[in-house]
Each structure stands twice: as C-alpha cells, then as structure tokens.
Image (tube, grey):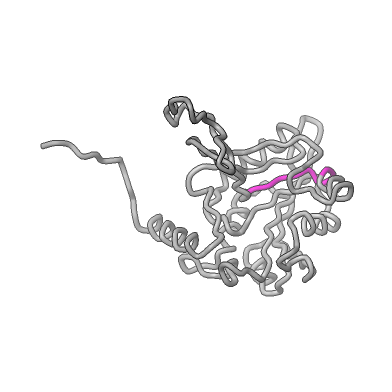
Amino acid sequence: MVMISENKTSKLVAMVPARTGSKRVKSKNLRLLNGRPLISYVLETIRSVNIFDEAYLNSDGKIFNNIAKIHGVNFYHRAAELANDTATNDAFGYDFLQNVECDYLLQILPTSPFITANDIKAFTDELISKDLDALISVQAHQIACVYKGEAINFRKNKVNPPSQEMEPVYSYATALMGWKRDVFIKNFEELGVAYHAPQGTVGYFPLTGVSTIDIDNEEDFVLAESIMRAKSHINLGEPKYYVEE
C-alpha cells in the first residue's frame, strides 16, 4: 500500500501492456536489445522500484506468461480482440481495471527501456501527492514550434528570443501514464474514452534525456542498441575541452 495521507493508504498497481503483433518492428517486445528481450528492461526496473502492491504484464500472447514469471510479475491474459490493430488503450485498460482491483494504475510501456526507477518513483509521488485523476509523461521542446504551419510559441514578426527563454511546448512521451481507477472507468463508461482523462484533474510530468526514447520503428531500435552498448563500455568521466596550445 502507498501512503497518500497520514490516515489513508492506496493500492498501487503497475501494468505493462505488450501485444504480440507489431507491424513497424516485427515482434518488437521480444526482439533482443543488447542480448535481452526489449520488454525485460522495464520489468526489471519495476521490480527494483518496490513501491507497487502488484505488477502485471498484460498481453494476448502466452509466450509472455513465461517472461512474467521470470521477472516476478503477474500475467494478465488479454483477449485477442483487445490486441489487434484497432484495439485502443482505453479498451484494454478498461478491461484490465474491470478485473484487477486497485486505487491507482500506473502503465509503463515496454518500448521505453531507459526509464529509471527514479523516474517511476517521482512520477508516482506526483500522481498521488497532488491527488491527480491522471498524470501523463511528456517531453519539453524549448525551441520554436509550429502546428499546421502556424507558430505556437513564437511570433514570426518578432525577433526570436534565445531558446532558453522560450516557452516550452510539450509532446506526449507516453512512457508513463497514471490514472485513478474509478475516474478511468467513469470516463470510459460515460464517454468511451479515458486515456486523456477528459473528466478530471490532469497533470503532465516531464521526462528528459534517454528516458524519452520510445522504440517505435527500426531507427529507434538502432539508436537504443547503440546507447545500450555505449553505456556498457564507455565511462565518460569528467568533461574535456579543446584548448589552444
């Protein structure tokens, strides 16, 4: 149980969704990254956090049952119709919450292998301490941004300020998503959508650095593999600079 006040505790459940089918990168959750299945990284991190009452691997593929056992998490067998190309996070999240009791659900994507235990702890603390109905991980872009050809955080007829002074624009990182169970269910049953918490208080949690990497295509896999290998073999030490002789 997670303490949310001096007199009240709350049940916190982690869920890692992993369907068997993926088109852009074949079987990406099972593909080896630095010699290990991609999904193993987040499962290992979840176990190291030690703040969850229960943790689940949610999948339609029975092969993931064995992976769940290896990493000491529960396996939730998702129906095939909730794992096809048209299935939404709203639908399989609702199905999961109909069968797993909790107060808060934290979803962690297996395609985010660089998410750290500190990321998860800080995210969970913000979700619960601020009494949010939903918390969404985002990435800040502190640079001139446009949408459909229109400026968002700058004016075309004004001198562009230094990037460090610009108002950042945030995009979903989606590596971490958290919801109050009751609010998620209420939104889904009343509106058919719950992922963005259309009814409720929503917070946005910035991720930085490699924690923002989400493996979505072949190029992402190449990048992640390179980072993994570099982290294993390179000790950068103190920064060095060019100086004139």
The picture quadrant where one finds residue 63 is bottom right
Q: Position of residue 155 (x, y in %)?
A: 51, 28
Q: Main secondary structure of the magenta part?
A: strand
Front residue of 213 and 160? 160
Q: Residue at x 75, y 33 (%)?
A: 131
Q: Quadrant of the N terminus?
A: top right
- State yes or no: residue 234 in magenta: no
Q: Position of residue 219 (x, y in %)?
A: 47, 62
> Is residue 100 toward the left or the right of residue 222 in the image?
right
Q: Residue furthest front?
A: 157
Q: Position of residue 13 (x, y in %)?
A: 74, 51
> Is residue 214 toward the left or the right of residue 19 in the image?
left
Q: Residue at x 53, y 63 (%)?
A: 217
Q: Residue furthest left?
A: 245
Q: How many marks are shown on the rendered structure?
A: 0
Front residue of 100 and 110? 110
Q: Position of residue 68 (x, y in %)?
A: 67, 66
Front residue of 244 and 107? 244
The vertical placement of 110 against 163, above or below, is below
Q: Residue at x 71, y 74 (%)?
A: 62
Q: Quadrant of the C terminus?
A: top left
The picture quadrant where one finds residue 99 is bottom right
The vertical placement of 107 against 2, above or below, is below
Q: Residue at x 54, y 33 (%)?
A: 168
Q: Which residues lie in the magenta part?
A: 176-183
The picture quadrant where one finds residue 153 is top right
> Is residue 55 toward the left or the right of residue 237 in the image?
right
